[in-house]
Amino acid sequence: MACVLKLFAVTNGSVFSLHLNSRRRFHRRFNAKIKMSSSDAALPSLPDNRTVVGFGMTAVDFLATVDGFPKPDDKVRSASLKVEGGGNAGNALTCAARLGLKPKLISKVADDSHGFAILKELEADGVDTSFIVVSKGGSSTFSYVLVDNQTKTRTSIYTPGDPPMMPDDLSQSTLLSAFDGARLVYFDGMFPETALFVAQEAARNNIPILVEAESLREGLDELLKLADFVTCSAKFPQAWTQAPSIPSALVSMLLRLPNINFVVVTLGEGGCLMLERSANEDSDIEERDVESFLEFLYKGKDDSLAIPTCIPSAVTKFRANGIGTICGRFYIGTAEKIPDSELIDTTGAGDAFIGAIMYAICANMVPEKMLPLAAQVAAAKCRALGARTGLPRRTDPHVVSFLH
């Protein structure tokens, strides 16, 4: 009989319980799902409202794989070369489209060959490009990306488009048309002045806002104040808050940004960590030091599992020393363990994660389902070169079971 491991910890009179199914039964059930063909697997119905709007960068990526990153003055031969679409917003919305959403992209390209290729590729994937501004003259955004086959890391050289997007490029009537029927508006943090203009209009129309905080950028603070949801890179929370750790930084973010429902920080192969605000301010809820609490919660993580999982906490008052206290729930999301032979390129993995988060929000998924879905989609992307080639469609048998 498959055993169930119960891990109990008693602290200040509280009992926390984590139930971990036996590895054998878990893998048997999961592998059975994976073997189902896309025609046999029952797809869940699409979200009732699946229109999302994205604002930010779309680009062309020139990707070259090399056997080792070159040293100064070295010459190396590329093992392969690929040219395909890139840019945070363009990638995330492509991911959302393949999962079944109806995305509209607000961005800017030039009337050059790169701009034409960008529009053509997005349209082929089902992204509405009618709100992309095409400038006469100038240049579209592009990046050179070197992928190291040995370390599985990538280095990007980004060249912004010119002229940049400005508020005058968009009329209020254009925005109202873009927002028509929208369930969510996503911002990748680019074009800060115009992003704020668009976000303010979205807020006036009561449309939830998802902001990506990849790095410290001018104008990002004002954008974050309007956000309902935030996704961060691993370095951003501490850089922005100056907190001593990621858990305490997440507490600080929710205290400083009272409109935020949740914040997720992606940690690469370490998965992700999410803090969700709770409206429950019951005086009976126990207060815990956030550092010791997360240390305990991570003990429930089963490192032997290869597929993405989620470990939730109970609603708790989390205290960060010198910062304050917030009532909420933490969630530990694990990443898929990708075999070295299958790991090709991490370019755009964070964009894939965000595309899946957009789907989850539209589908009203609980975090326990949202985080494993996002991790699975990001892992699928990493099995191919470039930000978009590996993005799965909703019929992919490796994704179907995570959509339910």
Image (cartoon, helix red, strand yellow):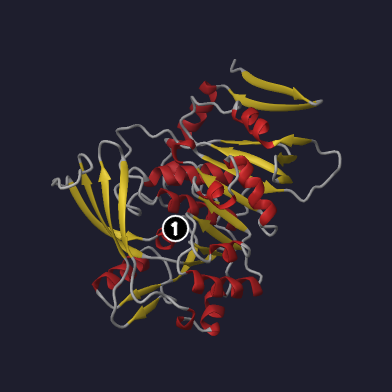
Residue 10, position as x, y percentages in the image: 75, 23
Residue 61, position as x, y percentages in the image: 29, 59
| Nearer to me, 256 or 25 | 256
Is residue 167 among the parts visible in the rendering? yes
Identify the image quadrant of residue 179. Answer: bottom right
In the image, residue 191 sits, relative to residue 264, either above or below, namely below
In what element is the residue under mark 1? helix
Residue 54, position as x, y percentages in the image: 49, 66
| Nearer to me, 346 or 30 | 346
Give the crowd class for mark 1: few <14, some 14-19, many >=20 residues within 10 Å.
many
Q: Amino acid at mark 1?
A: Ala
Q: Residue at x 44, y 54 (%)?
A: 351
User: Which residue lies under the disc numbered 1?
Assistant: 92
Total labels drawn: 1
Q: Residue at x 48, y 81 (%)?
A: 170
Left or right, 369 with reference to 27? right
Q: Residue furthest top?
A: 1
From the image, which quarter does the N terminus lie in? top right
Residue 339, position as x, y percentages in the image: 35, 32
Is residue 403 among the parts visible in the rendering? no
